[in-house]
Amino acid sequence: MQDMLQAILDQVRPLLSQGQVAQYIPALAEVDPHQLGIAICSLDGQLHCAGDARTPFSIQSISKVFSLVQAISHSGEEIWTRLGYEPSGQAFNSLVQLEVEKGRPRNPFINAGALVICDINQSRYATPALSMRDFVRHLCGNPRIVSDAVVAESEYQHRARNAAMAYLMQAFGNFHNEVDAVLRSYFHHCALSMSCVDVARGFAFLANSGYCPHSGAQILSPRQAQQVNAIMATSGLYDEAGNFAYRVGLPGKSGVGGGIVAVVPGRYSICVWSPALNASGNSLAGMRVLELLSERITGSVFSAVP
Ligand code: GLU
């Protein structure tokens, strides 16, 4: 496995100079684009790594899965009165659909949907940012995970579009807490700084019917874990979810920090990271690494198990 991972990274490395690091969050625009790492956590407890697998990066929208899992774990099906689980086919930060659909976001993985989920969590926890951080530490078995205050502040300073979505939803009666407070929590989640190893470990429960192998905790029921994987498969890669299903064929979630997490139910959780993005905001090299990985090692959920 190790040699195969190294060979895949070597093959993909020429792509590193082709993408663009996220520019709209100034703190992320400074990240060196020539980094590439992968970690695979198998359910028998083995960890396989290559490249910059232990370098922390900004998980950004990957945090939307953690927020969703928190909300499902305390509110269950009730959350779907506030948002849907259909793909949006729009950019992750689009306002257009939100206006047309009367403030009800299509799914929890576009920004509007993630903000509603944060609003639900804000009503539930006294200190939502700390609750999230501690939840993630628990899932990954790493008590040193922190949120990068510089990135969170940089996002807050450039919050206009996310604030616009939240106020629009408030106008439609679908936002219950103070917008600014929810935005602060949301940016703290996005700014969590984690390595590929952390993220792969943190998603192992979704490959394992909701049961976290490191902590021994049942995080979600098997049915709920399957549902989260389904939403990742249909909406996890912004408006490129179809391309990801076609090329990789796994439930996945990307972030503009260049991370992509993927789940092979019953077998592995995977995180690949490379900061330079394609036009849809997904890691250019990361997509290719996962494509090669699914061809050579993991298979796709749309094919027979290799
Ligand atoms: N914090 C970013 C934003 O709100 C997250 C974007 C992303 O990773 O998709 O715009």
Image (cartoon, rainbow, N blue to C red):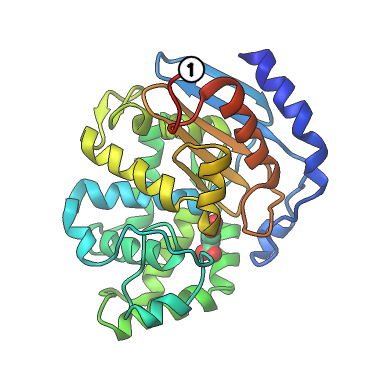
- Secondary structure category for the residue under label 1: loop
Location of residue 53 (image quadrant): top right
Residue farthest toward the front in the current orientation of the protein: 303
Residue at 48% in and 48% down: 62
Location of residue 267 (image quadrant): top left
Where residue 303 appears, as percent x and y from the top left, is: 45, 28
Residue at 25% in and 28% down: 217
Rendered position, 69 above or below 79: above
Query: Which of 38/160 is in front?
Result: 38
Residue at 31% in and 46% down: 69
Numbered label tally: 1
Where residue 205 appears, as percent x and y from the top left, is: 34, 31
Q: Quadrant of the N terminus?
A: top right
Question: For mark 1, does the 10 Å Cα neighbourhood hold few (<14), some (14 to 19), or many (20 or more) residues?
Answer: few
Residue farthest toward the bottom in the current orientation of the protein: 171
Residue at 60% in and 59% down: 150
Q: Which residue is mark 1?
A: 306
User: Viewed as shown, does residue 96 lie left or right of 130?
Assistant: right
Rendered position, 198 above or below 124: above
User: Viewed as shown, does residue 99 lie left or right of 287?
Assistant: left
Rendered position, 236 above or below 205: below
Where residue 272 appears, as percent x and y from the top left, is: 60, 36
On the question of residue 177 being in view, the answer is yes
Q: Is mark 1 within 8 Å of ligand 1?
A: no
Query: Which of 182/243 is in front?
Result: 243
Q: Identify which amino acid the numbered label 1 is placed on.
A: Pro
User: Viewed as shown, does residue 174 lie left or right of 138?
Assistant: left
Where residue 208 appears, as percent x and y from the top left, is: 33, 26
On the question of residue 144 being in view, the answer is no
